[in-house]
Amino acid sequence: MIELSHVSKRFGEETAVDDISLRVPKGKFCALVGTSGCGKSTTLRMINRLIEHSEGDIILDGQAIEVYDPVKLRRRIGYVIQHTGLFPHWNVARNIGLVPRLLKWSAADVQGRVEELMDLLGLPVGEFAHKYPHQLSGGQAQRVGVARALAADPDILLMDEPFGALDPITREKLQDELAKLQARLHKTVVFVTHDMDEALKLADHLVVMREGRIVQQGSPLALLQQPADSFVESLLGGLERGLKQAALTRVKDHMTSMGPTLPAQSRIPADFSLRQALSMMLRDHSDRLTVVDQHDVPIGELSLRRIIKEAQLDKGSARE
Amino acid sequence: MSLLDALSTPRLRWDGRHPNTVLVSLSLIMLAAFWSLDVVSMAPNRIVQGTSYGALEALGWPGALLATLLLSFIGILAWQPSPRHYRALLAAVMTLMALMPVGLIASSYLLIDPELPQARLGLGAAYWVVLFVLLLCLIEIRLRLKLTRLWPTLLLCGVALVWWLCATLWLDSLALVQEFKARDRQFLRAIGQHVTLVGAAVSISVVVGLVLAMLMRRYARLQKSAFAVLNFLQTIPSLALFGLLLAPLAWLAANVPLLGQLGVSGIGTTPALIALIAYSLLPMVRNTYIALEEVSPDTLEAAKGMGMRAGQRFWQVRLPLALPVLLEGVRITTVQAIGLTAVAALIGAGGLGTFIFQGLGQAAMDMVLLGALPILMLALVVDAGLGALAEALRPGGTR
Amino acid sequence: MSNSLSVAQPRKRAPLWLWPLVWGALLLLSVVAMSAAEPLFRWIEPDARQVIYDRADFYVLLGRHLLVVGIAALVTVVVGVSAGIAVTRERGSDFLPLVGQLASLGQTFPPVAVLALAVPVLGFGTLPIIVALMLYGMLPIVRNTLAGLQAVDIDIKTAAHAMGMTPTQTLRYVELPLAAPVILAGIRTSVTINIATAALGATVGASNLGDPIISGIVNGNMAYVVQGALTIALLALTVDSLFELLQRQLRSRLSAP
């Protein structure tokens, strides 16, 4: 668990982070979102003491971080940065095995762990182990970066705009993989990004920052339904907020059982999002969809009217 | 400097509580040198080895105290640096430099027996160390105050003027002055020769270098072979290149009457000039070539896209952008040529090197100084002047 | 290190290790068997009483030349590289601007002038030339050490730091290996320049390969000058090609793009 209470950071006269409090429970995914220069990266770097905070307490697993030796602390926390920071003079295997070697694991253990991680991240050992960073594509390099961060099996993973430099398609693919990975590994993740869609897609807990302060935090849905001010609203996409909210909701949560009328022509799998459902309705000029399971067997239906009503209900529940 | 370790908390440079350790240590070094090394030496005549004197004997206790105070003042001011303190530091350093000849005048009164007209005063190690460290202080202060090179250079010229006045009016007993007085005509002629040789060699190699670099850009094959030849030339010691030109030129002068009439001969200016040009070409061509090549292709493409003709692109875009790097080449070449011309004295080309080699031959160290110091100063002045010019020509100011 | 990646190199050129061998062999030949070339030098100086420099054996001169350059290089490398490292650390960062300026000032001092100024303090002989070479050779090493260390990508240093490497580990395993090619290039420049500059030592009584040149100039004997110049040039080429070899190996080991 990570807990920040009333943390500030000053560089001389300038206050980079101003009195922020934040709690990330074990196994949860927290995203810090904001425009550049809002202090989100500084906040992240204070957690592994790359930057020492000026005021307040940062508590990891019940202990103030000042208690830990900074070097040992960093070896226990995974860290992924935008441009990967892979060592260009080391091959992929050596890069991934860095922290285990720093922790003086035996050579065999290191090798076993490296192969396990390469497997986990979809990097065939035979093909990639001996490649050098400059021989990798951006997506491959960032997979290696993630593998390196996970090498010593840290409980905490800090990610500083890890997918910021990738093309949209690769980025989306890696986001999906990270979501799957997190579902398996349950790390405590703090993830910095300026891409709200990325944050909405991955995070359990969303923190919006501006000029060193936290403007709003909460679950992605709560933020979408009740943005605290116009800044958060504009970050959330203004008019498109409704669609973003729809993107977070699964079809299966809103379908109704099959009605007496003829089933609709268009079919949608139950684990798709409401946004995809809306898109399909628009495309097929229909206000009803048949919901199917993974074997393409109809299990219910979804109507436009229902989607709109549910949205109102959600709003009501969020207000409570 | 953005390249400094950006991870740790950036320390603000104007943070008053953070002492400028550089200036503090420099001040300590000067104090240590002042009190532990000899300040001046005194010899009854030119041949006898002098006796050395420390700070107290050389300056008397008031002088020694004043110097100590001024030197510690630098350290104290640097302990809590602020823009105001840095300006005060600049003033302190300048004052110290301007006072140094006054110290010499004092020691000439204290130490020199008026009965000995031949007696001469030599600068001791402490003087040299303090002078050198003061220059370092000046560089450090210039960097902290973000001044261009121009101002300190002008201030130094003022200090040099003070030194010159003191030397001509009151410092007859200084060994350097005596050496100078003994051969002032010769000295001025040597400086003239030196500067002419350097100027001629550099201007010829600038023109040749520019032409060669432009040819290289057109003919890629020329580039490889030309750089190979120029690189090879640099591996031959300057001494040898001067020597190697003696015989062929002597032969030419003897066998081709026209060349002989033009003043070409085995020894003297001609071989020196040829060798100097040969050495100057590599840095010149390399920098010109790099300067012209490194202009961003985007900019050039934009110029092309706007409809500029090849000639317009060269004169209005490529050359102005390349100029600072090109000037850097001229600076390196000139500084190198100033040093090499000193060696040319060995083959009778004259110049300040004459004093160095004569002095070494006679074991007269003051005469060596008479040659070496102006060479050093010439190099520093050219370096600072051309550096300032390149800085000023950089588009968009100093950066 | 695995060499699984095939470095695509045009095979037409002679292998790199050939050049040091060729130059080295020629150098050895010239210092051992200079007198065998007497007819050639006789052709250059038909009238001289003697055409082969014989006041000292060439291999002795070569040895002394190497010794002077070697000592100067050793001191410069140790001092220059450690200074470069020290001022790029956080604690020494105050000194970075000054050292950078100082290094470039070092080459402004003409070696002849430094040599001349060193004689009054150190006396005649080998010591002044070593000092002059040290000053003159310091710039390329300090400059390249600074450039090499500063060119290490900030992301890479951040990563090293964040993975829990100590500053020493970062320096040793990340910064120095990545800066090594640039530093080596600086050492190469410094040493090659100094091999030629060391000849100046002959003017202050240091006996080395500059001796034949000075003596040739003084006596008007071109053959002596050629012998000195030839040996020094061969020495410079041998050392330079050795550095080239070293640099290539380092680069292929680092396999930088």
Image (cartoon, coloured by chain):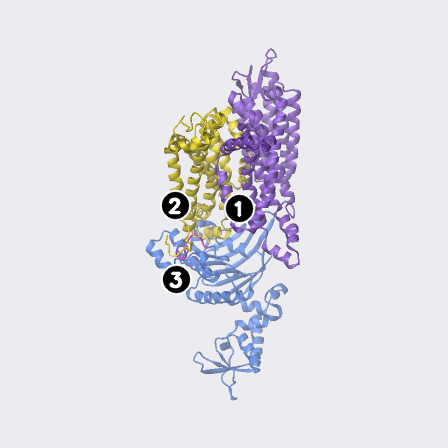
Residue at image position (39%, 51%) is: A102
Task: Mark 3 vs mark 1: tell me if same chain.
Answer: no
Look at the picture and state if B392 lies above or below A168.
Answer: above
**Residue C7: quadrant of the picture:** bottom left
Cβ atoms at labels 1 and 2 below 8 Å apart: no
Indicate yes or no whether the magenta region holds residue C210.
no
**Dot 1 corresponds to which residue?**
B4
Vertical arrangement, residue B48 with respect to residue C127, above or below: above
Chain C image colour: yellow
Q: Which residue is mark 2?
A: C18
Residue C167's x, y, as percent?
A: 45, 46
Which amino acid type corresponds to the residue marked 1 in the rendered image?
A: Leu
Q: Are marks 3 and 2 on the same chain?
A: no
Neighbours of disc 3 within 10 Å: few (<14), some (14-19), many (20+) = few
Which residue bears the numbered disc 3? A127
- As measured in the structure, the alpha-carbon distance from the residue carrying label 3 to the one carrying label 2 is 35 Å
The purple chain is B
Mark 3–mark 1 distance (CA, rounded to whole Å)? 37 Å
Q: Residue B222 versus residue C69: which sits nearer the camera? A: B222
Q: Is residue A206 visible?
A: yes
In depth, the one of C51 and C117 nearer the eye is C51
**Screen quadrant of the N terminus of chain B:** top right
Overall secondary structure of the magenta section = loop
Query: Compared to A29, does B119 lie above or below?
Result: above
Are tags 1 and 2 found on a single chain? no
Letter of the chain that mark 3 sits on in the rendering: A
- What is the CA distance from the residue labelled 1 to the residue labelled 2? 41 Å
